[in-house]
Structure formats: C-alpha cells, structure tokens
Image (tube, rainbow, N blue to C red):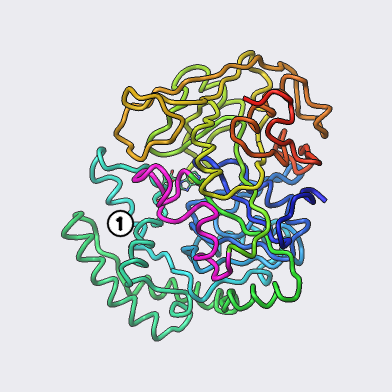
Amino acid sequence: MIISNQVKSTQHSCVVGLQWGDEGKGKIVDVLSAEADIVVRYQGGANAGHTVQVGDREYIFHLVPSGILKEGTACIIGNGVVIDPRALIEEFDGLLENGLDHEANIMISDRAHVVLPYHGALDEAKESASEDGKIGTTLRGIGPCYTDKASRIGIRMEEFVDPDRFRERLTRIADLKNRELESLHGREPIDAASVYEEYSAYADRLRARVCDVTAYLHEQDSLGANILFEGAQGALLDIDMGTYPYVTSSNTSFLGLGAGTGFSARKVGRVLGITKAYTTRVGEGPFPSEMDDEAGESLRQAGAEFGATTGRPRRCGWLDIVALRRAIQFGDVDAMVVTKLDVLDHLDVIKAAVSYTVDGVETDQFPASVDCEIIPHYRSFPGWLESTAECRSFEQLPEKARQYLQFVADAAGCPIAIVSVGKERTQIVTLEPWLEPGAGGEGD
Ligand code: IMP
C-alpha cells in the first residue's frame, strides 16, 4: 500500500539511515511493519535508540526491532547485532508494563555476540582516557564487543545460554580483560563470579529465544513471507564508509545486511533511505553543515533533538546533499523518506549544502580524511512559514515545501517515497507515484 511501486524482484525491504543516525527510522519501520510478517535488526546494539510515538505513549527501543508493536510480527535480532542481555530484558519488561506481552515474538541469532560488563567498563575507560582520542560513544560497550568479535574472543549467544561453557569462557576472558582494565586504564577489575551469577539469570530468560535465525529467514522467504530489515544508526556512522574513526563499529548501511543475517542482500527488493529534512549528529567528528549558532539551537528545540539513548543534545545543521548522495550511492538506495519536514515550518530561509571546498579544492565528493578543512557551499530556499503537520498528501503541502522536496530529490538523484510531518504514526505523506528527480521540470 505505502510503497507499492518500483519493487525490483521481491517484496522484502530494508530501511536504513542516510545520515549520522536518529533520522526517524523507528517510526517508518513501525509504519511499514504493518505489511511485514518479519522485522529484522542486523547490526549495532543498545547504542541505537528508536523512538515510536503511538497516541500519547512514546516507546524507545534500543535492541528490540521497532516492529515489536504489531501483534504477531516475528522480530529477529540477527547475528550482526551485539546483545546486552540486561538491556534487552529491561526492554522486554518495559513492553510488559505497557501491556505488550510480545516477548515470545522475538528470535535471537545463536551467532550474535554478547555485550558483557567488561565491554562497558573498557568503553568508558577508553573514552575518558584522553580528550583527543574521544569518539563520543554511547558508552554501551559496543566498540569493545565488536573488537572481541574480530579478535575471536567474543562470547556468542549459543555459548551464553550453555551454563558450563559460559562460565568457563567468561572466567578465562574476564581475566584477560581485568589485566587490561587494571594495568592499562587503572580501573577496578570485574568480578567474574558475580557477573556469572547475574548474567546466567538473564541467560535463563533468553534461552528459549535463541535459535538459528538464518535458517528461519530462508524458510520463511521460501514460504512467501514479507521481511523488513531495519538498519540502526546511519550510513555516515558505517565503520567502512563513514567518517572514520568517528563512526560506530558495524556496517550501519545496507552493506551490513547480508553479513548481519546470513540472508543475501540480493533477495531484498527495495532499500529505503531515511533522511531528516536537515541534519543532526551526536558525538564527535566532522559535520560540514553544522550550525553552531542560534539557528542550530532553534532546530534543536523545534525538533527536540536530544539523544534517545544518552539524552545528549544533538548537534544540528542544514541538509548536506554531498553526504546524502554518497550514502545513497554506497547504500544502493531506491528511494528516500524525508522525515521531520515540519521542524522547518517556522524558518524563513532554509539552506542545503550542495558542494564543498576541501583544503582549497572545490568538490562534490565527501572526503576520506577527517583532518581536512571543509567549507560547505549552500543553496538557499524561502521557507513556507505554515504548518505541515496536518498535510496528508503532496498536494496539501505548501508550494515552497514541495519545491524544497523536489530540490532534494533532484540534487540527491533519488526519488522520495514518503515524507513525515510529525511524531505520530498518522503524520505521513505517501508519494504515489514517488517524487522522481527532474519531476519538477527544472533539475538542479
Ligand atoms: P558507539 O556506537 O556507542 O561506539 O558510538 C560511536 C559513535 O556512534 C558515537 O558518535 C555515537 O554518538 C554514535 N551513535 C551510536 N549509536 C547511535 C544512534 O543510534 N544514533 C546516533 N548516533 C549514534
């Protein structure tokens, strides 16, 4: 119904962020999950924060796929996700408190890695070690857990739910980690015995949820199920393609899907990339179109730009077309969803960065280095200065808002499928057919 046109080959879809996270994926996944039988998370961990507003209730998910709100949707946590059992169980309990007894709908990959207390302790120790090397992480132990995965000393879910193997591995690895914590960082060691006691209770609760989700996905695909994959964070935080080292530790874009699920990305018919109508970022790292001034503050207030996971104020800036084009390209994005258009309603001038001067050279490409000087060049648009919150069709949007959206499609070289104009599920403008680049008659 919502995005029925231009399906390549199958009905499976993937939703990814095109910026530095917090693009509003939770709401879009929640809306699209109306059509999905299965919703899958494939990377990241409890560093993510997906907010979904239903009526006057706000749900924030960190690990559980946003599709959990729909009864009967199977929610899968793939092998590419790093799972903090304590955070996951807190989320289960939060759902129960809201009357949503959907825990049995969750399946967790037996190959997913487990985030343990020494990961959080190391994340915190490394971040506070020096201002210079600071990434501004969420302190959830994500980087240290993926480091252990790559170093082949991680503990996976299948081992975690096997008491004897878990105890043996935890004792051995905690010893290694304690040496690092104590001698390198001057921190208190972790008491492996008490971690075991606490975490084996979590393992007891999660055991029935752990299975071979790859086999399940393939089986359901062959039975004709509709699968929705949900990327966490945003493309510019991708460990390979993002603003390294100011990135998270996984492939946040479409690139992570295959490796994070064991389900081929070639089977996914449609990739939707989510972008805000402007840009935000939390943590350190380059942000060429940042507005470190009153205009930025006004966006932060209007858009309630405070982190869902850490509560940190988000850095705010104009839409960056150079960065957006790059994310669309490496993420093989079929269409964009533009969120939070309503946050621009009060502005008399709206800008978008269309090219850069990088170390004195004009370019329309995003640089690899984070140490260069980037001067963004903007194009300005007149604001529409009226509320879009009640608009439910493209025609109902103010003309200047339509022109801005057409510019975004033209400049990014990618159609727009959906525009979001508020927090509520219903505050959505579906573009059927999609708003194509060049459709306004005067391409950028
Ligand atoms: P980590 O993922 O906690 O290691 O943090 C690495 C970087 O990714 C930091 O700049 C975080 O602020 C950022 N980050 C991680 N998760 C999110 C998210 O869900 N939204 C926005 N930024 C995130």
Q: In this view, does 422 lie above or below 73?
A: above
Q: Which of 352 and 366 is in front in this view?
A: 366
Query: Is 354 left, or right, of 130 in this rendering?
Result: right
Q: Which of 132 and 273 is in front in this view?
A: 273
Residue at x 72%, y 57% (from the top left corner) = 69
Which residue corresponds to mark 1? 122
Q: Quadrant of residue 340?
A: top right
Q: Is residue 268 above or below residue 232?
A: below
Residue 355, percent from left and from top: 47, 26
Residue at x 40%, y 51% (from the top left corner) = 240
Q: Which of 189 and 78 is in front in this view?
A: 78
Query: Is 362 left, or right, of 210 in this rendering?
Result: left
- Asked whether residue 242 is drawn in magenta, I would say yes
Residue 320, percent from left and from top: 52, 30
Magenta stretch, main secondary structure, is loop
Magenta range? 236-264
Q: Residues within 10 Å of mark 1 (few under 14, many from 20)?
A: many
Q: Is residue 34 above or below residue 357?
A: below
Residue 329, percent from left and from top: 53, 45
Could you tell me which quadrant the C terminus lies in? top right
Mark 1 C-beta to ligand 1 under 8 Å: no
